[in-house]
Amino acid sequence: MPQGQPERVPDDGLTTRQRRNRPLLIVHTGPMKGKSTAAFGLALRGWNQGWSIAVFQFVKSARWRVGEESAMLALGRLHEQTGEGGPVEWHKMGAGWSWSRRAGSEADHAADALDGWLEIKRRLAAGRHGLYVLDEFTYPMKWGWVDVSDVVRTLRDRPGHQHVVITGRDADPRLVEAADLVVEMTKVKHPMDAGQKGQRGIEW
């Protein structure tokens, strides 16, 4: 795509404007760090456009508070106070989904993940958000907690103008096939190769 121009124009009956504004299903996968970071960068762009942003973090511990969470929630408060940008919601499976507050232990992760996906399905059906970040959502699919066919079908048939970005390693081939944009993060070099642990502002 030199200079942002498509290499070919499909014969799909759509105008250039219609084709440009199609809602996208985006997958960030691969073994290297940066998948979530890139997704949250998209969330910042979406917020600036006034979209409603919803982040659903699967697998992450309730004790982890990544820098993007604090920043995005601060932007959500700015929207509430001034009308600038768009509204922001942030949900973490490890904290107990905010609409259910399920009691239980780590053994309930599979049920919690399914709870999260069912809530996302409801929101998609209602056209509630402009951008969904489903962070580390590839893992519940890989582990069989959430049905991949249901995910692909729901995302393919979602109404309105709702972008969805999914992050995590080992994305299912069916999800990759259904996606409009797929990025695979691969390692060329990493500080850990030289024995350096993660640091503030880079990893969190």
Image (cartoon, rainbow, N blue to C red):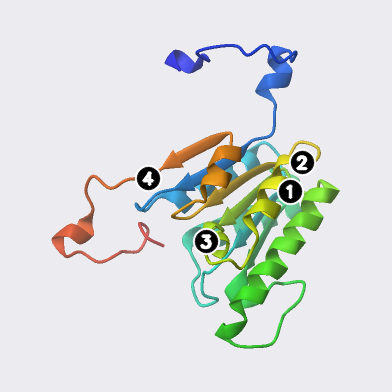
Crowdedness near tag 3: few (<14), some (14–19) or many (≥20) residues, C-alpha within 10 Å:
some
Element at label 3: helix
User: Label 3: which residue?
Assistant: 142
Q: Amino acid at mark 2?
A: Asp
Let me know if residue 17 appears in the view: yes
Distance from the alpha carbon under mark 4 to that under mark 2: 27 Å
Confirm or deny contact between disc 2 and disc 3 (CB under 8 A): no
Q: Is residue 45 visible?
A: no
What crowding class fits label 2: few (fewer than 14 Cα within 10 Å), some (14-19), or many (20 or more)?
Answer: few
Q: Where is residue 76 shown, x and y percent of the image? A: 67, 55
Q: Depth-wise, is mark 4 or mark 2 nearer the camera?
A: 2
Q: Residues within 10 Å of mark 4 (few under 14, many from 20)?
A: some
Q: Which mark is residue 185?
A: 4
Residue at image point 35% right, 57% down: 202
91 relative to 5, above or below:
below
The residue tagged with tag 1: helix, strand or loop? helix
Q: Is residue 52 above or below residue 97?
A: above
Q: Are marks 1 and 4 in contact (CB under 8 Å)?
A: no
- Specify which label sits upstream in the sequence, 4 or 2: 2
**Callout 2 touching callout 1 (CB < 8 Å):** yes
Q: Disc 1 to disc 4, how far (Cα)?
A: 26 Å
Residue type beneath disc 4: Met
Q: Position of residue 167 (x, y in %)?
A: 51, 52
Choose between 45 and 162: the one closer to the eye: 162
Q: Quadrant of the C terminus?
A: bottom left
Residue nearest the viewer, comparing 119 with 81: 119
Q: Nearer the viewer, mark 3 or mark 4?
A: 3
Left or right of residue 145: residue 99? right
Q: Which residue is mark 1?
A: 154
Q: Indicate the amino acid at tag 1.
A: Thr
Tell whether 118 sits left or right of 36.
Answer: right
Q: Position of residue 1 (x, y in %)?
A: 45, 17
